[in-house]
Image (tube, rainbow, N blue to C red):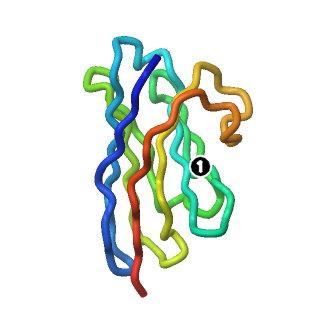
Amino acid sequence: QVQLVESGGGLVQAGGSLRLSCAASGRTFSSYVMGWFRQAPGKEREFVAAINWSGVNTYYSGSVKGRFTISRDNAENTVYLQMNSLKPEDTALYYCAARGGLNNYAAPRNYDYWGQGTQVTVSS
């Protein structure tokens, strides 16, 4: 089992940047595929980015590709989401999640563990 704690959210102006962190407990962090998701009020939870066990392979939604970068540090049990060129439509509660496999990585239902989320608000 793994516990996830996100941090780094906040209020930023459009065009600005934020870096989210997700710290994981446990000694098997490197055995998990990690994902970032977000949920805006009244909307379904949506996929943002995912990264494989070693960090070599990364995956992004079309809406964030080229602006966001996911990375991980297995020695520190942490996954990051660097968000640049933020837009008001990026405003949401951002969650990190963990799972064992990689197939269908964009589906929230395939993730086993979730953090509590960190709020990102982008003002225009």
Q: Residue furthest left?
A: 76
Foreground residue among 35 and 44: 44
**Furthest-top residue in view?**
27
Q: Would residue 73 appear left or right of 42 to someone viewing this image? A: left
Q: Quadrant of the C terminus?
A: bottom left
- Foreground residue among 47 and 59: 47
Furthest residue in direction right, as rendered:
104
Question: What residue appears at the point 40 percent right and 72 percent down from the top-left corner?
Answer: 121
- Compared with 22, 28 (above or below) is above
What percent of the width, then of the height, locates residue 107? 70, 41
Label 1: state its secondary structure: strand
In terms of depth relative to the viewer, which is nearer, 12 or 4?
A: 4
When asked about the image quadrant of residue 104, the answer is: top right
Measuring 48% from the left and 70% from the top, which residue is drawn there? 91
Q: In the visual, does 58 lie left or right of 21? A: right
Check disc 1 and give the amino acid type: Tyr
Residue 44: percent from left, percent from top:
68, 58
* Left or right, residue 124 beside residue 21: right
Residue at x 62% of width, y 50% of height = 47
- Against 67, residue 2 (above or below) is above
* Whether residue 38 is situated above or below residue 29 in the rendered picture: below
Dot 1 corresponds to which residue? 60
